[in-house]
Image: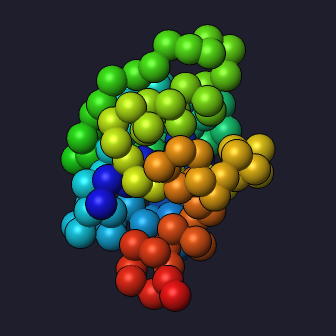
Amino acid sequence: MKVFLDTNVWLSATVFAGLCEAIVLESHQRHRLLTTRLVQQEAHAVLRRKFPHLSHAPALFDAVWSQAECVADVDEPAKDNDARLVRAAQAAGAAVFVTGDRRVLSWGPESGALQILSPRQAWLLLSGQAQ
């Protein structure tokens, strides 16, 4: 299954141990993990702004992020990176878009063939625990 993670999921996995970290590992090991350069750009900006004391975090993020399949960015709508990421996931044929963003979650759970899921919902699906 193709899985696309929103920037906030990648960031949580990079900075904190827990559910998002498990999702990254599960997606990488048992599914096809997709990403875009926009995710990397957003992650680096947030890490510099919110976690300057974690100087190793950008390198750690890049090491894990580089293992995902990088797909084409989508340029529109130019002022809504969340919508751009969802559209990139759709264009790449992702089955699941994982986000903690309430606004993006309100677009789902399905946006076309793409399921927009919270980290908890995604974990249940990806780990085979969904009913």
Image coordinates of residue 19 in percent, x first then y, are: 52, 72
Image coordinates of residue 127 in percent, x first then y, are: 39, 80
| Left or right, 68 with reference to 128 | left
- 51 and 96: which is toward the camera: 96
Image coordinates of residue 12 in percent, x first then y, are: 56, 56
Quadrant the N terminus occupies: bottom left
The residue drawn where x is 44% and y is 30% is 88
Count how many numbered circles sit on residues in the image.
0
Answer whether residue 65 is visible to the viewer in this image: no
- 88 and 39: which is toward the camera: 88
Q: What colour scheme governs how the chains and residues are painted in the rendered image of this protein?
A: rainbow
Residue at the far front in the pictured view: 112
Q: Quadrant of residue 118?
A: bottom right
The residue drawn where x is 67% and y is 39% is 50
The residue drawn where x is 33% and y is 70% is 26
Answer whether residue 49 is visible to the viewer in this image: yes
The residue drawn where x is 46% and y is 75% is 125
Up-down: is 79 above or below 42? above
| Left or right, 26 with reference to 21 | left
- 110 and 80: which is toward the camera: 110
Up-down: is 78 above or below 44? above
